[in-house]
Structure formats: structure tokens, C-alpha cells
Amino acid sequence: MTKWGLLVVLVLVAFDAAAAPSRGEGPRQRAASEAMGVELKNYSKSLRQQRAFRIDNQSAARLVKSEYAKRRILGIRIISGRQGPAYRVKTLSEQGVVKFVYVDAQTGDLSE
């Protein structure tokens, strides 16, 4: 019984090693998906870079602080606005009034 168990383990290990791509080979194309008519999506790096935010949360805080120097920043949250992603920066004025300043994550434009 142990001989058969050992044989099964060796066969499974050999099968798994043959299925994995070797170092530097990259991902293999799947012939079965092509035969079934399934199209594999290849996203380009430029598409990923377009979706990446040009302004990070620290830069958004700096922009708000430079425009509204007397306000204190209480918090920052990323939201999805009508024109795309934006940062909602919660500020506190000297009079104790809480106001929100919105920073466009792509352009850095400020709005209240």
C-alpha cells in the first residue's frame, strides 16, 4: 500500500513540476480557452497608469493647506465623484466650523 501511495505522490509532483513555467519563461498561453472562444484580456501598462491617481493623499493635504492656511485638517478620504476620483478633506476653521474641501485626484483642482 505504501508503494502505491509513494508512486501516486511522485506522479503528482512530476505533473505539477511539468505544468509550472520555468524561470524567465513567463505565463503560458492556454490553448483550451482559445479553442472555446474565450478571449484573454491583456491590459496594457498605459491603461493601468491612466487609472492610477496622480495626486496622493499627502499631496492633497498639502494643496489644501497651501490654499487654506488658517484651517486645520481633520481627515482625508478618497471618494468617487462625478468627474472621477477625488479626495474629501475635512477641515476645521478658526471659528470652529467644519468644512469639506474636495481635491480632484487626477488634476489637483480644489473645490468646496
Image (spheres, rainbow, N blue to C red):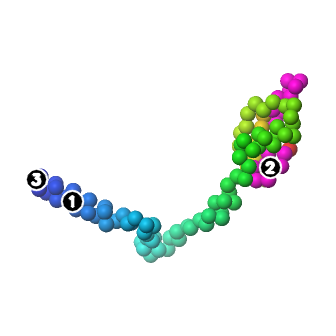
N-terminal-most mark, 3 or 2: 3
Answer yes or no: is residue 41 visible. Answer: yes
Among the two numbered marks 1 and 2 on one chain, the one whose residue lies closer to the N terminus: 1
Q: Residue at x 16, y 54 (%)?
A: 5
Residue 70, position as x, y percentages in the image: 87, 31
* Front-lying residue, 80 or 35: 80
Q: Could you give the CA–CA distance between mark 3 and mark 1, rounded to whole angstroms? A: 14 Å
Q: Amino acid at mark 1?
A: Leu
Q: Quadrant of residue 110?
A: top right
- Would residue 104 appear left or right of 45 to someone viewing this image? right
Q: Nearer the viewer, mark 1 or mark 2?
A: 2
Q: Is residue 93 magenta?
A: yes
- The residue at the point 36 percent across, 64 percent down is 20
Q: Tag 2, which secondary structure?
A: loop
Q: Amino acid at mark 3?
A: Met
User: Which amino acid type is marked by label 2?
Assistant: Gly
Q: Which residue is mark 3?
A: 1
Q: Earlier in the sequence, mark 3 or mark 1?
A: 3
Total residue callouts:
3
The picture places residue 58, in percent across and down from the top left corner, at 72, 41
**Crowd tier of the residue under label 3, counting other residues whose Cα lies within 10 Å: few below 14, some 14–19, many 20 or above:** few
- For the residues bearing labels 3 and 1, Cβ distance under 8 angstroms: no
What is the secondary structure assignment of the residue under circle 3? loop
**Residue identifier under label 1:** 10
- Percent x, y of residue 73: 78, 32
Q: Disc 2 marks which residue?
A: 108
Read off the magenta span: 91-110
Residue 39 tag number: none
Residue 12 as seen in the image, left or right of residue 97: left
Characterize the local packing of mark 2: few (<14), some (14-19) or many (20 or more) Cα atoms within 10 angstroms: some
The local crowd at label 1, few if under 14, some if 14 to 19, many if 20 or more residues have their Cα within 10 Å, is few
Q: Quadrant of residue 112?
A: top right
